[in-house]
Image (cartoon, rainbow, N blue to C red):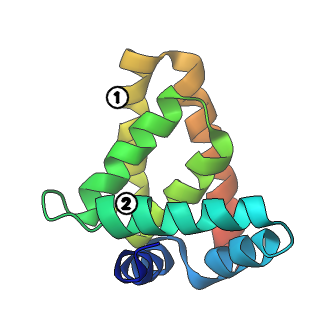
């Protein structure tokens, strides 16, 4: 494991997804070595290497994630990255526009799921 990339990745992951989510993911992984290895991989390569590359800012990376996760129909990850997109400065209107764009290229059902996931998250956030 590259400790520098891992540490940079954990810092970015916490900034985008929030401490509560990251702490929960790490706690759940502590119970089994396979998920622990996956958490290390995600922190090092996804968050440490790719998310910290200079070519795109975090806001743009969030837009891309919303589109790709919608296309792949990954609602759990999509919900997580809607929160991350908000943390990276996207507005709710911009997130909606990402789902409308996805409707054209990924299909209406995928975009409708994206809107549903975002609405559920917004309700959670607004209750606080």
In the rendered image, which quarter is residue 55 located in? bottom left
Q: In this view, does 46 lie above or below 89?
A: above
- Location of mark 2 (residue): 91
SS type, badge 2: loop
- Location of mark 1 (residue): 101
Q: In this view, does 116 lie to the left or right of 56?
A: right
Badge 2 or badge 1: first in the primary sequence: 2
Seen at 43% across and 56% down, the residue is 92
Give coordinates of residue 35: x percent, y percent.
73, 61
Q: Which of 42 and 99 is in front in this view?
A: 42
Seen at 37% across and 70% down, the residue is 48
Q: In this view, does 95 lie above or below 98?
A: below
- Furthest toward the front, the residue is 1
Seen at 41% across and 60% down, the residue is 45
Q: In the rendered view of the protein, which quadrant contains the C terminus?
A: bottom right
Q: Nearer the viewer, residue 89 or 30?
A: 30
Q: In this view, does 114 lie to the left or right of 95?
A: right
Give coordinates of residue 4: x percent, y percent.
35, 83
Give coordinates of residue 80: x percent, y percent.
59, 58
Rounded to the nearest whole Å, what is the CA distance between mark 2 and mark 1? 15 Å
Q: In this view, does 10 lie to the left or right of 113?
A: left
Q: Is residue 119 visible?
A: yes
Q: Is residue 60 above or below residue 57?
A: above
SS type, badge 1: helix
Q: Can residue 118 be seen in this view?
A: no
Q: Which mark is residue 119?
A: none
Give coordinates of residue 82: x percent, y percent.
51, 55
């Amino acid at each position: 494991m590259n400790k520098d990339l891992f540490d940079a990745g954990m810092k970015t992951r916490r900034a985008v997804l929030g401490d509560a989510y990251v702490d929960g993911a790490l706690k759940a992984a502590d119970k089994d070595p396979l998920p622990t290895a996956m958490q290390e991989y995600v922190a090092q390569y996804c968050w440490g290497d790719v998310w910290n590359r200079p070519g795109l800012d975090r806001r743009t990376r969030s837009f891309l994630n919303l589109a790709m996760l919608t296309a792949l129909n990954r609602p759990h990850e999509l919900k997580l990255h809607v929160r991350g997109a908000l943390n990276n400065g996207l507005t709710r209107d911009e997130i909606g526009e990402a789902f409308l764009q996805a409707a054209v290229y990924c299909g209406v059902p995928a975009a409708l799921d994206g809107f549903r996931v975002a609405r559920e998250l917004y309700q959670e956030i607004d209750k606080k």
